[in-house]
Image (cartoon, helix red, strand yellow):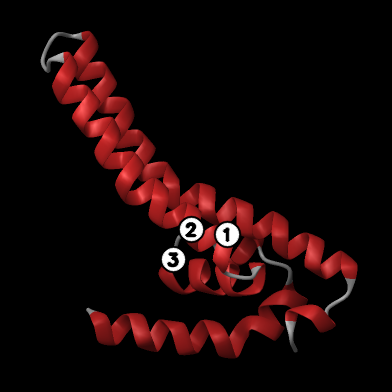
């Protein structure tokens, strides 16, 4: 079933899940950045080093995930997150999992080949 063919309620739920998925994928990068700030506060790194790490985050994971979120439809984002393991399938409605099942399995096989 195409995203455009889904009910408004299902599309809304997919958007919510997509936001949750993207937050989950962003979280580890933000944790690392938080540690960088703590290192800076303890005087372990200098201002310019912290600035460099903030820039690397902004040019790297933040930009990549932001672009992905803007470009991909919510159903694809959710399927990708489940396939990658960054979104627990337990939080995804059964009906949505059933619809996205083939896409999730296809993505899992692609990601397995990349390993």
Above/below status of 34 relative to 72: above
In the rendered structure, are the residues bearing label 1 and label 2 in contact, judged by CB atoms less than 8 Å apart?
yes
Q: Which mark is residue 48?
A: none
Reading the image, the residue beneath label 2 is 67
Residue at 48%, 58% (x, y): give it: 67
Quadrant assignment, res 100: bottom right
Q: Which mark is residue 85?
A: 3
Of the 4 image quadrants, the one containing the C terminus is bottom left
Q: Which mark is in front, 3 or 1?
A: 1
Q: Position of residue 112 (x, y in %)?
A: 30, 83
Q: Which mark is residue 70?
A: 1
Q: Position of residue 50 (x, y in %)?
A: 21, 23
In the image, taking residue 8 as reference, residue 102 lies left or right, namely left
Quadrant assignment, res 96: bottom right
- In this view, the residue in front, 28 or 95, is 28
The mark nearer the N terminus, 2 or 3, is 2
Number of callouts: 3
Q: Residues within 10 Å of mark 2 (few under 14, many from 20)?
A: few
The mark nearer the N terminus, 3 or 1, is 1
| Secondary structure of residue under mark 3 | loop
Residue at 46%, 60% (x, y): give it: 86
For marks 3 and 1, give the CA distance. 21 Å
């Amino acid at each position: 079933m195409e995203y455009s063919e889904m009910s408004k309620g299902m599309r809304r739920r997919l958007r919510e899940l997509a936001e949750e998925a993207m937050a989950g994928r962003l979280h580890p990068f933000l944790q690392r950045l938080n540690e960088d700030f703590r290192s800076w506060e303890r005087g372990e790194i200098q201002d310019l080093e912290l600035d460099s790490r903030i820039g690397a985050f902004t040019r790297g994971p933040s930009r990549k995930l932001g672009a992905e979120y803007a470009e991909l439809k919510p159903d694809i984002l959710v399927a990708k997150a489940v396939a990658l393991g960054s979104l627990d399938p337990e939080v995804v409605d059964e009906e949505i999992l059933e619809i996205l099942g083939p896409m999730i399995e296809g993505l899992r096989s692609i990601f397995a080949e990349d390993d």
